[in-house]
């Protein structure tokens, strides 16, 4: 579990599948994750996270406000992704619409980045962001040192990244 001033990041459980639906329910989130409105996809998302915990000791974690334990407001965490033929540690986040714009994603992402470097999980931590996702671009710009374009699945994406201190 990771805690910040306002947030708690904890492992997902299967009970988080239904609350996770709200995270991907609004039009903005569906624009970038169109299939996450399907129950099977959400269950797969949680199972993928549970598998990552077992395999790597990390993954996307459920995000809660410290003062409201049990109320899922999103996720944030670390997963391995294929980037230009290399396995890189990616930092990702998603927030329920009602909690966006309060700095929670930035706070959680900074905590996860610190976690990765404190535990020497990687020499570089990155975030893959769709250029049209202005909200995630803003968070990534606050969290990471630099960015560049790259091609993923025939799409031009932005790769934000930070090197270990």
Image (tube, rainbow, N blue to C red):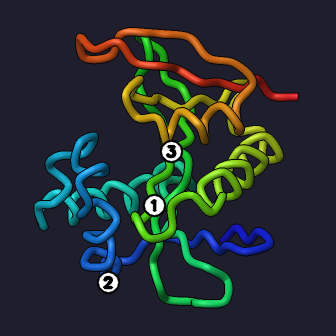
Mark closer to the chain start, 2 or 3: 2
Give the percent coordinates (x, y) of residue 57: 57, 55
Q: How many marks?
A: 3
Question: Which numbered marker is on residue 12?
Answer: none
Outermost residue, right side: 165
Give the percent coordinates (x, y) of residue 157: 40, 18
Tell me the residue at 59%/29% (across/down): 126
Residue 80 against residue 10 in the figure, above or below: above
Q: CA distance from mark 2 to mark 1?
A: 18 Å
Residue neighbourhood size for the residue with mark 1, other residues' Cα within 10 Å, grouped as few (<14), some (14–19), many (≥20): many
Residues at discs 2 and 3 in contact (Cβ within 8 Å): no
**Could you tell whether 21 is left or right of 140 in the image?**
left
| Residue that mark 1 sits on | 95
Q: Nearer the viewer, mark 2 or mark 3?
A: 3
Residue 46 against residue 164 in the figure, above or below: below
Question: Which numbered marker is on residue 15?
Answer: 2
Tell me the residue at 65%/74% (across/down): 8
Residue 30 against residue 149 in the figure, above or below: below
Q: Nearer the viewer, mark 1 or mark 3?
A: 1
| Residue that mark 3 sits on | 92
Tell me the residue at 76%/23% (across/down): 163
Give the percent coordinates (x, y) of residue 125: 65, 31
Residues at discs 2 and 1 in contact (Cβ within 8 Å): no
Residue 156 against residue 129 in the figure, above or below: above
Mark closer to the chain start, 2 or 1: 2
Q: CA distance from mark 2 to mark 3?
A: 21 Å
Q: CA distance from mark 1 to mark 3?
A: 11 Å
Residue neighbourhood size for the residue with mark 2, other residues' Cα within 10 Å, grouped as few (<14), some (14–19), many (≥20): few
For numbered disc 1, what is the local secondary structure?
strand
Q: Quadrant of the N terminus?
A: bottom right
């Amino acid at each position: 579990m990771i805690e910040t001033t306002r947030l708690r990041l904890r492992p997902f459980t299967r009970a988080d599948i239904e609350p996770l639906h709200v995270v991907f329910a609004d039009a903005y989130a569906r624009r970038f994750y169109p299939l996450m409105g399907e129950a099977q996809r959400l269950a797969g998302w949680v199972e993928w996270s549970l598998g990552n915990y077992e395999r790597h000791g990390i993954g996307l974690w459920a995000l809660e406000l410290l003062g409201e334990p049990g109320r899922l407001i999103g996720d944030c965490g670390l997963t391995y992704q294929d980037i230009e033929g290399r396995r890189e540690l990616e930092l990702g986040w998603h927030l329920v619409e009602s909690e966006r714009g309060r700095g929670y994603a930035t706070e959680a992402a900074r905590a996860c980045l610190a976690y990765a470097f404190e535990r020497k999980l990687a020499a570089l931590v990155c975030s893959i962001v769709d250029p049209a996702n202005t909200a995630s671009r803003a968070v990534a710009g606050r969290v990471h040192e630099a960015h560049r374009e790259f091609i993923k699945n025939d799409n031009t994406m932005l790769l934000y990244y930070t090197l270990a201190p």
